Amino acid sequence: MSNHPWLAHYPETIPATLTYEEKPVQMYLTNAAKDYPEKTAIHFMGKELTFREVYDSSLKLGHYLRKLGIEKGDRVAIMLPNGPQAVISYFGVLYAGGVVVQTNPLYTEREIEYQMKDSGPKVIITLDILYPRVRQAMKHTDLEHIIVTAVKDYLPFPKNIIYPFIQAKQTGLKVYVEERGTNHEFKRIMALESAEELNIPINFEEDLALLQYTGGTTGFPKGVMLTHKNLAANASMCASWLYKCKTGEEVVLGVLPFFHVYGMTTVMILSIMQGYKMVLLPKFDVKTTLKTIQKQRPTLFPGAPTIYIALLNDPDLKKYDLSSIHSCISGSAPLPVEVQQNFEKITGGKLVEGYGLSETSPVTHSNFLWDRERVKGSIGVPWPDTEAAILSMETGKILPPDEVGEIVIKGPQVMKGYWNRPEETAMTFKDGWLLTGDIGYMDKNGYFFVVDRKKDMILASGYNIYPREIEEVLYEHEAVQEAVAVGVPDPYRGETVKVYVVLKEGYSVTEEELNEFARAHLAAYKVPRMYEFREELPKTAVGKILRRVLVDEEKKKIEKIG
């Protein structure tokens, strides 16, 4: 117990260890179609699909992929926003025995080309409006086929007629893709293909289900190899953590993108596994999200701090009823305490911070939603079957409670390694522990705290400064909506602290006022020396602020001056 002090705080309803059924991820859909054939699995902008319809459609796609030559272990890229096609494509690839390569729809030609070259898929499934970009990138890769769908394909009448005009106005694109040669129409596959069962033998422990590319926030994205066991284990852990949620009854808001592992596991796989209804949104938009919550009454809302912050700062927030939401786990970035408290006040539900990485499918830690006190500022405790510790960055030894070092993880959700990168894989593991690159500590009760990213630490005049601490202070200022601190080169101090700030609508504050506020709450060496006010900050698709982009901007400015 001394190595796992957190287990003393587990409610009786959460087991310390789980039993995992050794079945591939797609079997959850097979089972859901048998258990809930007529129950709504997906609600998408007014269109609804039952579990049976999702299952049949996934099998149809699986059969078609086999006809295109996809064999066990072959990669298939999916470049889609959230919608029925994203779910059908994901399970269709798995039924065919393939490995999903999730591709961000916002990627440029260069980024698509890089990922396709690295992962080597033969087929990509994408949207009509993304087709020109994919087609250009395809010339320089081994891609052989493009399966094309459109948002309108799964919209009810009359939205399916109106939507292409709205899309053309918003994007300036009107694309018509003809079915011939290497082009294949998703809609036609659904109309003509067979929905017979597909049973490709899968090794639960060893076979890959997914290549999940890292966000690239610290360099070139790497393909994280996640097995069927990794994903099934993490979704099972999630279900055990949400022990008050009722199988077959919850409604999950799917605004986190499925091309990111966080949305894929905590919304898509969990919902299919537990027979929950998914309410899907193709992208995050404040007004659409608020209207959807009021109308569709979701009970679970996995999200990210930037999503909750944007909703809380909408001037019309009080016009909407968000009281259906009873549980939210926030991930992908630190959750400011103010945001947690305000969101709980508005919804009456619980919002807790969790923690994870692409390399861990993704969740490893979370605060308890019910029956236990929450610890302010903590990412919570390790999930069932998950071991975590703090490693000294100097000696490489496990540290005692309250000492700061690198957070390390072991567990069934930990990746097999990086795709075609044996050296980087070896560098990421030490004595069986996954090195997270995050600096933190564990208190005597087994609660973990993230101090910062190892790569983000600012070294000024010999002092270690953690950006998160500065950001937490600035979030307490009434005018600040978002804040991010970075280290910028300084000829005297080595590095100095610069803060980028987005103000709440209707608020104003001067640099001097913010500086005074920071001085009242931080040691002198931690106080930012530079402030920059912005309308918005660069972010990943899941709302993680891209600190690297801001650091690169600063370097370029200095190079120009130099």
Image (cartoon, rainbow, N blue to C red):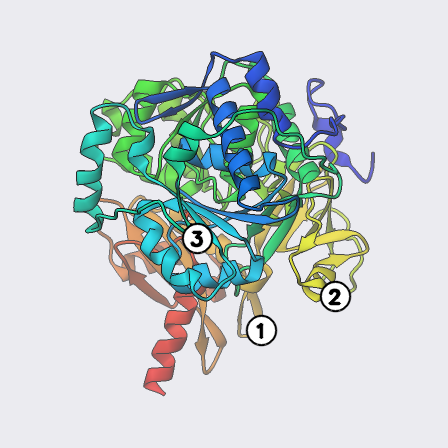
Kindly indicate the quadrant of the structure image that contains residue 284.
top left
Is 167 or 307 nearer to us in this picture? 167
* Amino acid on which disc 2 is placed: Glu
Q: Which residue is mark 3?
A: 471
Q: The N terminus lies in which quarter of the figure?
A: top right
Q: The C terminus lies in which quarter of the figure?
A: bottom left
For label 2, the SS is: loop
Q: Which mark is residue 462?
A: 1
Q: Is residue 268 left or right of residue 388?
A: left
For label 1, the SS is: loop
Disc 3 packing (10 Å; few <14; some 14–19; many ≥20): many
Query: Which residue does the image show at 65% across and 45% down from the upper left?
Result: 226
Disc 2 packing (10 Å; few <14; some 14–19; many ≥20): few
Q: How far from the left and from the top, in percent, is residue 218?
A: 52, 63
Q: How far from the left and from the top, in percent, is residue 329?
A: 51, 32
Q: Which mark is residue 394?
A: 2
Q: How far from the left and from the top, in percent, is residue 417?
A: 69, 54
Whether tag 1 and tag 2 are in contact, CB under 8 A, the answer is: no
Whether tag 1 and tag 3 are in contact, CB under 8 A, the answer is: no
Q: Which mark is residue 537?
A: none
